[in-house]
Image (cartoon, rainbow, N blue to C red):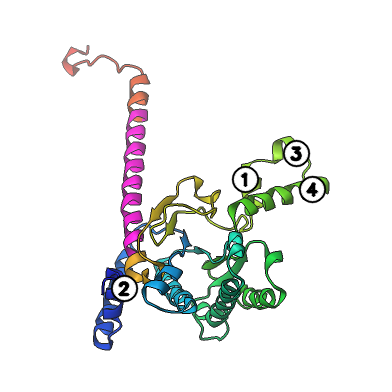
Amino acid sequence: MSSISFSGLLNSVFSFPILGYGASFLKDSVISVMRTGPVPKHVALIMDGNRTYAQRMNLPLRDGHNAGAESLVSVLDVCFRLGVHHVTIYAFSIENFNRSQEEIDTLFEILRDKLELLSLESSSFAQLNKIKIKIIGDKALIPEDILKDLEDVEERTKNSTSPRVLNVCFPYTSRDEITHSIREIATKAQAGEIQDIKNNIDLKLLHDSLYMGEEAPPLDLLIRTSGHTRLSDFMLWQCNENCTIEFVKTLWPDFKFLGITSLILKWMYYKTLQLDDEENDQGSTERKIVKNILQDLPHPPNIVSVTERG
């Protein structure tokens, strides 16, 4: 019993049919209320803890990764129903190539199978919710058979008119992404596509040349599960400014509705305070401007009584 987390226990309780109906109603109500507040437009996830979960539950490693894939669907459902536009997941780091070939093959196969399941049929999660799936990273490192299947997933979902996008970072590191951006700019400069190099190569151009491109909104919230407090070379450029970073101890397979809603609620609370402060600052500034205008007006003429006229 000690190996089961509190979050995992609640998820197990909610899986009972009768309690499940009540839980579904409660979840719908919570999401409806949360939609009335400020909602992050871009959420990133470091889905850590699948291996530890498998070890604690005495499961094969593959089952641990499968449990993590189920959690991803639950988290995506909450995010997109709330109104989050982009969700970016760290599916496979370039550094993961240092793992055993068996685990690498397992991760590749699970990723391919789950993305196909998400997008293959008209009744699939991605098709029903009009989610565009994009593979982000150095695709040259992906085996040809896996890459073809992933490109088919991208092709099936690319015509979505919805703003919902699932960015799958695979294989990816921030250092590789920034190197890619610099390489893209150098190629354009050599081709003469950038006329004034001194003035036209700036932060915006570097940002727009990243794997995600200029259409991705700024990153609002980055979450890492399993208790590790490091970013592991993930979205270092994007989380540099105005981004909230949350490290939670929950293992990823246990990180479902309760995990994601609690962190987004926390983000919403502090975002509301920030917006209130900005509104108060703006109101104070406007009052100062009005006060200065009034002070600069010429003095009114002296008051003269009607009886004094004549």
| Residue located beneath label 3 in the image | 197
| Residue located beneath label 2 in the image | 8
> How far apart are the alpha carbons under marks 4 and 2?
54 Å
CB atoms at circles 3 and 2 under 8 Å apart? no
Secondary structure beneath dot 4 equals loop
Q: Amino acid at mark 4?
A: Glu
In the image, residue 263 lies at what x, y percent?
35, 59
| Residue located beneath label 4 in the image | 193
Residue that sits furthest to the left in the current view: 307
Using residue 69 as the reference point, say whether residue 278 is left or right of it.
left
| Label 4: how many Cα within 10 Å (few below 14, some 14–19, many 20+) | few
Secondary structure beneath dot 3 equals helix
Question: To which quarter of the image does residue 213 belong?
Answer: bottom right
- As drawn, the label of residue 204 is 1
> How far apart are the alpha carbons under marks 3 and 4?
10 Å
Q: Amino acid at mark 1?
A: Lys
| Image quarter (top left, top right, bottom left or bottom right) of the N terminus | bottom left
| Label 2: how many Cα within 10 Å (few below 14, some 14–19, many 20+) | some
Give the residue drawn at x 65%, y 47%: 206
In the image, residue 274 lies at what x, y percent?
35, 45
In the image, residue 22 lies at what x, y percent?
24, 81
Secondary structure beneath dot 1 equals helix
> How far apart are the alpha carbons under marks 3 and 2?
54 Å
